[in-house]
Image (spheres, rainbow, N blue to C red):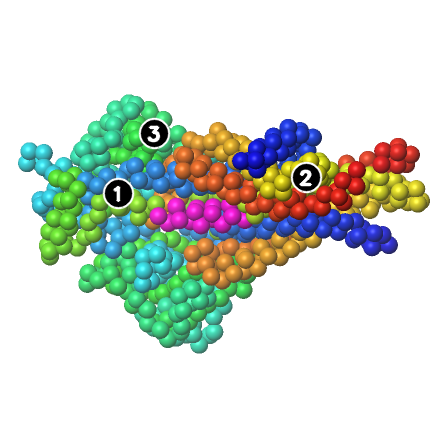
Amino acid sequence: MNTIKQIIAVTWLNLRNLPQRLASSAVAVIGVGAVVLVFAAVLSMAAGLERTMMSAGTDDTAVIMRRGSTSELNSGLSNEQTLIVANAPGVLKDGDKTVMSAELYVIADVKKQSTQSDANVPFRGIQAGAFDVRKDVRIAKGRMFEEGKNEIVVGEAAQSEFVGLGVGETIRFGQTEWAIVGTFDAGGSVSESELWTDVRVLQAAYRRGNSFQSVRVRLENAESLGVLDQALAEDPRIDVDVMSERDYYSSQSQGLVTFIKRIGYPLTILMAIGAIFGALNSMYSSVSVRGKEIATLRALGFGPVAVLCSTVIESVMLALAGGVLGGLLAFLVFNGFQVSTLNGPSFSQVVFDFAVTPELLGQGMRAALLIGVVGGLFPAIRAARLPVATALREL
Amino acid sequence: MKYFGLIWKNVWRKKIRTSLTILSVLVAFLLFALLSALGYAFKGGEDVADAERLVVINKVSLINPLPMAYMNRIAATEGVQAVTHASWFGGYYQDPRNQFGQFPTDPYEYFSLYPELKMPQEQFNAWAKNRQGAVIGREIADQYGINVGDRIPIQATIWTKADGSRTWEFDIEGIFETDDPRGSTAYMLFQYDYFEEARAFAKGTVGWYVLRVKPGADPVQIANAVDMQFANSPNETETSTEAAFAQSFAKQFGNIALIVTLIMGAVFFTLLLVSGNTMSQSVRERISELAVLKTLGFSDRSVLGVVLTESIVIMLIGGLLGLGIGWLIVQVIAGAMGAILPGIYLTSRAILTAICIMIGAGIVAGIFPALKAMRLSIIDALARA
């Protein structure tokens, strides 16, 4: 009990004379703050990308592509094959019509707002059922395109990221002019990075005959995926992969997410090591500045444990202050910041927001805590071992 | 120089503090090395690009093919010396994660367009003779342990064969290298004839053309001439220099690379600030010692020099160590991950920049306390002690 009282007393004393050691304490705080800032900022890219990609996928929608395709872009299905899928068991019917959309996924060159250079923007041809297989997509501005016309609706994210996609504008791809007649909202999912038009019109414009690249169907329930998969696997007329939309988008985002994490974590560790050196330095100088004070306390009867703990606590508090600062800065500056990048498998742009999530901030604070403990421990041991007589004589 | 002994003693006056400062400078420059190598990979090797090579793609998008019939028309364009073509195969080896570039092309044309690629002549001849032959870059050979003489299956993600199968088998006839250390060899080349004959659809098309302009000809003018020929046809072209093509492709990764660089730049300077502050602090603590030096007859300028050199020395020790470790790591990554992340390379320009930053940061960290030390009035300083 007595030791705890001593710890509190010494810690309070330390914290009250912190202002006298402002410069070296600030160094520790800034160092830790930078670690948490970078950690949260870099990893928030992965988190944002994952959220964007995953929010597009549901378990009760199936995506059917040619077997072996790694994304819609390199798949290919004939009209007959899409009809086989439409009549397969396990898919949801609305009356006698299947809830489905056979789609074409191509790329159009559009300039990026930020770099003013051409980017591969995904351009999707859809059937009327597209809005039924994707539950949370709705027209936000303007109107839906008319079937058979060279009209486009653009995702909200695509509109803000790329040049010349305002409602009422026209855009030229190759020899075809397209009128932009509306925008759609897809709850911030990857669909919002896309341009949509009537699949028949897109087939003609890109000379794809009567071919498609993917079929999306609503399933009767999440368990029907297996039924559909088996039925199509046994059908000799068709050779396709069936997966839930959630699995599809997870496979699409995996590469980039892993890449960002593989860069983000090692960098954070490296920087944390740097910050530990900073914290050690400032705590060592704190101990050496307070040498007389510590010796006086010891002479007055304060135990070495109290001195040790108070030094560690000071270091942890400085580190946590840095962590809060860095986390707050990361949240204020980066959360919601919109970017777009080229996603490998689909060879096209995906627009997403940085997401500084509570989990990331939590991990950042844990890192700060660790830096504080390690950075405080060794100087604390030195403080506790300070020979009282010698230190007092330095007066 | 004659004061070096003194400076060296000063550097190690407080061993722990100096070691910690050096270590944090080390980490900062290690980060710098890794990031600049990564940033270079993101740039997509635009420095390696040949100014006399032009790339011709479909104007709508790179994924749209061009007719094979354009080959002769491009070759006949005034000012064009040689032309070849390639296509995107997009297959993988054994596991879908093992993706690398595979390009069907013409052996003779391709190697004449890319003279930087080196391969033993007999390997090239063997490839040119074998329809199902292929050659791989050194990075691919090392990554997957493939040797000359192996027969490897590549799983197609796009190109189903006419017989419905998706497994393409290739005889590895050679391994090529590039004589530009910055260039990537993380790809495979195989015969277009085999590709064209076996694929199920899109026959008679290629992905893109690459041409070389005659020496002295104006690349921009020739690019326009090529595009003019195909204007208003169903397949309009877009011709650009290889450098512009690489650059515009790299820009597709967009702000990400920029943001990573900015964040890391901020960290780098924070780490420098932190170590710089510690160094200034250590000089401030020694003001009275400096006064003693001046009492002993050191001139104002030698005191300034001694203090400045000390902080530069600390920066250089930490910085060069960090840069060296960073260089080693980049070598390891380039060897182990060349196929996944091609073009990771620490340029001599980056190294030079780093050294300039070390010296600059050393000066910035030392200049204020050094000036203070220089202007020191001996009596005041000694009295303060």
**Badge 2: few (under 14), some or many (20 or more) residues near its Cα, within 10 Å?**
some
Relative to A233, B373 lies left or right: right
Q: Are marks 1 and 3 in contact (CB under 8 Å)?
A: no
The residue indicated by pointer 3 is A156
**Label 3 residue SS:** helix
The residue indicated by pointer 1 is A246
Give coordinates of residue A198: x percent, y percent: 22, 35
Q: Chain letter for mark 3, please.
A: A
| Residue A123 found in image quarter | top left
Instruction: Please name the amino acid that badge 2 sits on.
Output: Arg
Q: Which mark is residue A46?
A: none
Of circles 2 and 3, which is in front? 2
The residue indicated by pointer 2 is A298
* First in residue order: circle 1 vs circle 3: 3
Residue at (71% x, 46% y) in the render: A387
* Residue B108 in view here: no
